[in-house]
Image: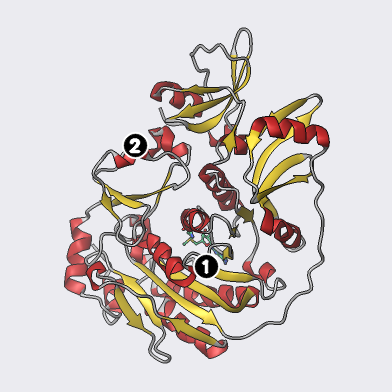
Amino acid sequence: MLPEKFLSSIKNVQGLDIKSFEATHLAQEQITSIRKNPFKNTTVFSEKNNEQVPWCKHGIYLSERPSFTLDPNFHAGTYYVQEASSMFLWHIVQQIFGDDTQKKILDTCAAPGGKSTLLASYFFDGLVVSNEVIKQRANILAENITKWGTTNCIVTNNDPKQFAPIKNYFDAVLIDAPCSGSGMFRKDITAIEEWSLENVSLCSQRQQRIIADIWPSIQENGFLIYSTCSYAAEENEDILDWIYNNFSVESIKINVPDSWHIVTSQSNQHKAFGYRFYPDKIKGEGFFIAVMQKKESAGKTKFKLNNFQLPTKQEQAFLQELVQLPNTLTLFKHHNEIKTIQANFLQDVAILSQYLYIKKAGTIIGELKGKNFVPHHELAVSILRLSNIATLELSLDEALQYLRKKEINTTTNHKGMVLVTYFGVGLGWIKVLDNRINNYYPSEWRILKN
Ligand code: SAM
């Protein structure tokens, strides 16, 4: 049952039909949706007749919820389990940027990575800075971004206020704000228990703080995409009015076909547009999203430029053997590791590292240790094409043993570092020795479920 206080607090929000809304919650239908990785093998889904999420071409609904933990494809990053309403972000960036995908995007509140992996797919030749303030959550974020495998992401672990000095920088900033969470009531009972009017008000203040902190880092004419999974006007339309009252902005109208049953709302004071998702109208959970264009400049920061070291000739020789890099990517050395990132954005890594704690930048290829080049796990799960690498396709049972970091009983004629794959997609490395096979799967990611 939904709390009375909650129901009466939302009875006037735009587009809500409270009776059918309540009935939908009582019915407790479970909706499962995933978003496919456009750069990995997802043919396993094309074979089935899965219903498409209308606003995101990579999104599909599954007819039943499998155990994702026991599906090696999930760990290989071939798809991300994402609530369907959230995938509307795809439609938004498509309308704003079209084919112009070489953009610098910040995802301010990014963990566990649903929207960042969507942005990484869309801006495949751009740069996605994926930030999370809470350290443990930043670890999960880095794991999910690594498994997604694209080379165009930086993961940072900073408070939004640390972005303030990076002025006039991003083409778009997403704030998927921490919120009171009423939109997730159907999926998450604890969200119901934790809900209170006081929390709605606290969340609204926190949302304003995050926006104010991030605001200078958006370029003039750049975009703020603001979203919550709350139904409260205080966290949604009222926040849009607050932005209007404090900054120079223009609300952006998004084209939404009527057949999608998304409610277009408008803020009281400034009539800014917002998009509301109700579970009795659409196939997904409660969600709100809006887009504002910044119409002022914060002045430009004069950034110090920095050059990274390049790989040595010896390292280059190993790399040529190992990986086929498209010429849109560049190599750089950070500590001793050799990494790659979109060439146009290498300078951004240098700039951002002067202000932020960077947990991960691009994709680590590996490291020269003595006479051997040791490939990194990030390379194994990346979308990069490897050459001259021995691979071993695993069965379901073998793949699960591998992901549990247990011994895998298999035979191979290869020796040394071998890439293990499932449905042709890299899961990680093993080292084949004369009398045993060492499992190199990262311990902190191993699955514990039997
Ligand atoms: N965007 C994520 C996704 O699609 O997977 C979900 C983000 S969740 C709605 C909000 C995030 O904001 C959480 O990861 C939370 O840790 C973070 N957060 C909490 N308090 C914050 C604060 N004061 N400033 C910035 N982020 C905060």
Whether the residue carrying mark 2 lies under 8 Å from ligand 1 is answered with: no
Furthest-top residue in this view: 435
Give the amino acid at mark 1: Leu
Disc 1 crowd, CA 10 A, few/some/many (<14, 14-19, 20+): many
x%, y% of residue 51? 25, 51
Question: Secondary structure under badge 2?
Answer: helix
Looking at the image, residue 193 sits to the left or right of residue 64; the answer is right
Q: Quadrant of the N terminus?
A: bottom left
Picture layout, residue 241 above or below residue 62: below
x%, y% of residue 56? 36, 59
Mark 2 = which residue? Answer: 44
Mark 1 = which residue? Answer: 174
Furthest-bottom residue in this view: 269
As measured in the structure, the alpha-carbon distance from the residue carrying label 1 to the one carrying label 2 is 31 Å
Q: Nearer the viewer, residue 447 or 340?
A: 340
Asked if disc 1 and disc 2 are in contact, CB closer than 8 Å, the reply is no
Disc 2 crowd, CA 10 A, few/some/many (<14, 14-19, 20+): few
Looking at the image, residue 30 sits to the left or right of residue 417; the answer is left
Between disc 1 and disc 2, whose residue precedes?
2
x%, y% of residue 220? 61, 80
Give the amino acid at mark 2: Val
For the point 68% across and 58% down, the residue is 345
For the point 33% across and 65% down, the residue is 286
Which is more foreground, mark 1 or mark 2?
2
Can the viewer see residue 205? yes
